[in-house]
Amino acid sequence: MTCENCKNRVEESINKIPGAAAKVHLKKQEAEVSLSGEVDNQVIIDAVEKAGYRVKSIQ
């Protein structure tokens, strides 16, 4: 991710997942995802990849 548009695409993709809210940090090249329910990690990975990006890890 290199620009504000990239950030917005990832946030919007994750935010479409029920119970998930994302905040992307461009300088850190990471997204912080808050969950209000159970969401499988693969659902988040799929959303990021659908936006055209890659997940390095989930912690």
Image: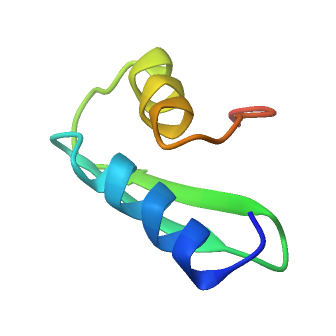
The image's colouring method is rainbow
In the rendered image, which quarter contains the N terminus? bottom right
Which one is nearer the viewer's eye here, 52 or 48? 52
Compared to residue 57, the image places residue 33 above or below, namely below
At 36% from the left and 49% from the top, the residue drawn is: 13
Relative vertical location of residue 50 with respect to residue 14 in this rendering, above or below: above
Quarter residue 18 falls in = top left
Q: Is residue 57 above or below residue 6?
A: above
The image position of residue 56, as x and y in percent, is: 81, 33
Q: Give the residue drawn at x 59%, y 83%.
A: 4
In x, y percent, where is residue 24? 58, 69
> Could you say where residue 43 lies in the image, as x and y percent from the top left?
39, 22
24 vs 37: above or below: below
Circle count: 0
Residue 12 appears left or right of 52? left
Side (left or right) of 54 relative to 12? right
Residue appearing at x 46%, y 23% in the figure: 46
Outermost residue on the left side: it is 18
Q: In the drawing, does residue 36 fall left or right of residue 2?
A: left
Task: Look at 78% across and 72% down and name the residue there.
Answer: 2
Placement of the C terminus among the 4 image quadrants: top right
